[in-house]
Amino acid sequence: MALSPPLPVEPVLGGAEKLDEVTRLINILEVDLKEKNLLPPKRNATLEELKVHTRSIDDADPILTTRGINVLCQHSFKGNSLTTARGALKCLANVMLLDPSTRQIFVVLGYAPKAAERLKNDNREDEFLASRLLFLTTYETNLDFEDLFENHQLAESINTNLSRHAKTFSKAGPKTSVPLFTILALSETLKLLFNLTQFYPHHALTFTKSLLYILKTLANIKVPSPPLQPPITYLINSLLNLDLEDKKARHFTQNPLFPKFDPNNNADRLIKILDSSVRQYEAEQLERLATPLASLIRKIYDFAPDTVKYHMRSLLLPSDEERAQPLGKSDTLSAHLLRLSTSPVAPGLRETISNLLFELSDRDATSFVRNVGYGFASGFLLTHDLPVPENALEAWSTGGECDTDPLLEDLGEKITNINGVEINPVTGQRRDRETSNTEVEMTEEEKEIEAERLFILFERLRATGVVNVENPVTRAMQEGRFEEIE
């Protein structure tokens, strides 16, 4: 079988040679604006040549000036050829991404409204390019987005584009691939939507109708492996600032988060993504990627119908079967969440998951300890000034009155009762499954995990002022009693 010939490689210029070439191309394009001396194929080829040099702004000074940006803007928005316009927009998008100072030049030249108008085109390449320009101008510019909302129907254009994406993905389904520019356009639109709702929250209600479109897209798009990558992450983030309850805009007679055909549908989808994520990413990655997802699940739970809440609790909280061993030891989603709730390398996610588990326990300290065990609950309760009621553990017992002062009893010796089975309130394990040998040797990895948990707990205690002692884990590390696991 003969080998295919290698693809031609574009020569990469640098230094004075690149500077001279960029200067030559800008001059050609500028003269063409005045004299219309280039035929469309030549004009497009010139822009394509220039685009190669915009992949790095080193030695590309003529493009980074007001003159250079103006040349690109005029070819982007004042010509009759959409092919030419898209070629110029690609150059412009590259430059504005790499050199933030050019974004303000773009704004001062007055082309942002034209970008908003371009969003009205029913074309995914135009959507991608215009959305990217507007997204970039949400940073380090003084662009008046109020004008774009009021006079250029910015919100309406974004809602319309998201509606188109919902139809595209609903028709294609998760097993059918869609064109690359469809994915790119969706991603840029969602990024723009998030920034607009973040920086201009008083306009967030204008995007409420897109709640349905985003959820439809999320329900039908193929989830990659690992899952938390674009556009999945952008779909999740875009929901965070919307009126999920539809309390104010009241666009829907039935909240699309809980559709009639299956009220659990969207919660299931999000929780499945979370389940897949905690198995495929390290804690440091989850800190950045999964925190928005956990926050969204928590928000949805807060106002979900009771039947959906019950379903979500069944997926996220430890089951009775998990209590055959201490909670957090198994490979279930709830066990992963419990371990992440004490992760020293993911403080944001740790707090978000702890809050989620507390919400799933109806914001009740007693239920919280019962659901996750005092070992996982104690740090959160102490740092949030939520002490466990003195008689909380005894209240769960079905065995009558307590004969001793609960304050004097050792917590680890108390028993609780869940579905007629006694459990250890600290570990959450069934008493009848506890080993008689209390000195079972832990693996080196388990020792390290336990040391991390103790470190976090003591630091939380110190922060509350409850105790003022040296963290024993810190002391042990200083004395060399812990060795790093390779």
Image (spheres, rainbow, N blue to C red):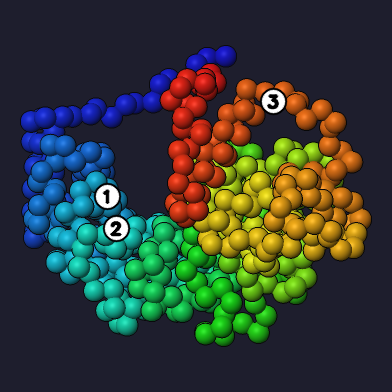
Q: Where does label 3 land, which residue?
A: 442
Whole-Å distance between the Cαs marked 2 and 1? Answer: 7 Å
Q: Where does label 2 land, which residue?
A: 136
> Can residue 420 be spotted in the picture?
yes
What kind of residue is marked 1?
Leu
Disc 2 is placed on an element classified as helix
What residue is shown at x 79% (from left), y 60% (from top)?
394
Whole-Å distance between the Cαs marked 1 and 3? Answer: 51 Å
Q: Residues within 10 Å of mark 3 (few under 14, many from 20)?
A: few
In x, y percent, where is residue 411? 72, 49
What residue is shown at x 50% (from left), y 65% (from top)?
240
- In the rendered image, the residue lying farthest to the top is 1
What kind of residue is marked 3?
Met
Mark with earlier residue (1, 3): 1
Whole-Å distance between the Cαs marked 3 and 2? Answer: 51 Å
What residue is shown at x 45% (from left), y 38% (from top)?
470
What kind of residue is marked 2?
Leu
> Can residue 87 be spotted in the picture?
no
Q: Which mark is residue 97?
A: 1
Mark with earlier residue (2, 1): 1
Q: Nearer the viewer, residue 307 or 270?
A: 307
The residue mark sitting in front, 3 or 2, is 3
The residue mark sitting in front, 1 or 3, is 3
In x, y percent, where is residue 85? 28, 58
Q: Nearer the viewer, residue 134 or 161?
A: 134
